[in-house]
Amino acid sequence: MPNPSITYKNREVPTKEEIDEMLEKADLIKNNYFRLRVKTLIALVKKFGKRRKELAMLERTDLKTEGHFFYVTFTITKKHKKGLFQYFKFLKKTNPSGLNKSYPELLTEWQAWRETELGQHTKTERRTKRVNTRDRYAKMVLEYSDYLNEYIPKAKFLFPSGKRVFQNYFVVSDDHLSGRQLLRLIKPLNEKMWLHLLRETKGAEISRDLGMNITAVTEVKNMLDLEKEETAWNYVRRYAVQEAKTET
């Protein structure tokens, strides 16, 4: 996430009214594709609280409708830094003499190595969410999906990349927009908005609805696909209200 402006980096999560204002502004976009695309982007983050990369990687086949439910399958990719023992194994294979250094030196090198690609491993999982097709946000995504089926049927990704040539926009069907490009789509609708803030909105919504309890922690962790319960607890602490027992 690009660093937000210092003037609003500590702003509160957006209200439903603020999100509605963005959608109303999006409705003024004359180009059908651009209008439906940005509304779908907002709808997916508002409903599921997903990260930019998870949205960018969505393929059209990741969306399906069965009965009264609309399903979306996200690809969750997380990087994990390797441990000190794994660094020793790496040195043993690539530079055995490096193991002869002092422990403080090895510790410093290991910490630097963990920031490199070799010092990390990537874990990829597939997570499916669903929502009733009558949901207002689901309807936005379905309308956009229908548009792609009719006018850009060869596009592989839900948010295919494109380029502008002489004021004309051409869709490139074999690649997707980057996370930064997705961010740029919503900026004209609200300059003080960024996608991670909309993700925060989902965590705040669950926390406020369920209160300060373990159920809220579990729901936040599962919906946002967080790695640690501690991160979910942070949402609950910030947004949930502790309810005192009623006494008569």
Image (cartoon, rainbow, N blue to C red):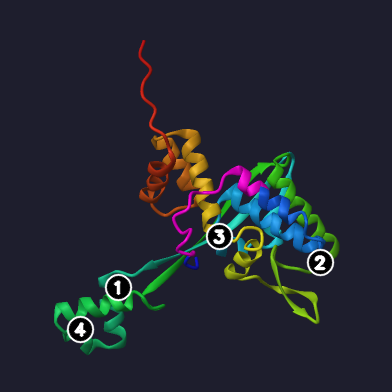
Residue 194 shows which numbered tag? 3
Q: Residue furthest front?
A: 7
Which mark is in front, 2 or 4?
Answer: 2
Considering only vertical position in the picture, is 179 above or below 66?
Answer: below
Which mark is in front, 4 or 3?
Answer: 3
On-image quarter of the C terminus: top left
Which mark is in front, 2 or 3?
Answer: 3
Amino acid beneath label 1: Gln
Considering only vertical position in the picture, is 11 above or below 78?
Answer: above
- Which residue is disc 1 drawn over? 86
Classify residue 131 by image quadrant.
Answer: top right
Amino acid beneath label 3: Trp
N-terminal label among 4 and 1 = 1
Asked if the residue under mark 1 is in contact with the one under mark 4, i.e. CB atoms within 8 Å, the reply is no
Q: Could you say which is closer to the camera, residue 142 or residue 110?
A: 142
Q: Is residue 50 in sight in this rendering? A: yes
- Spot occupied by residue 176 in the image (x, y as percentages of width and height): 66, 70
- Which residue is disc 4 drawn over? 99
Mark 3–mark 1 distance (CA, rounded to whole Å): 37 Å
Amino acid beneath label 2: Ile
- Which residue is disc 2 drawn over? 152
Q: Is residue 129 in sight in this rendering? A: no
- Residue drawn at 70 percent across, 46 percent down: 138
- Residue drawn at 27 percent across, 88 percent down: 95
Mark 4–mark 1 distance (CA, rounded to whole Å): 12 Å
- Magenta part of the protein: which range? 4-20
Which mark is in front, 1 or 2?
Answer: 2
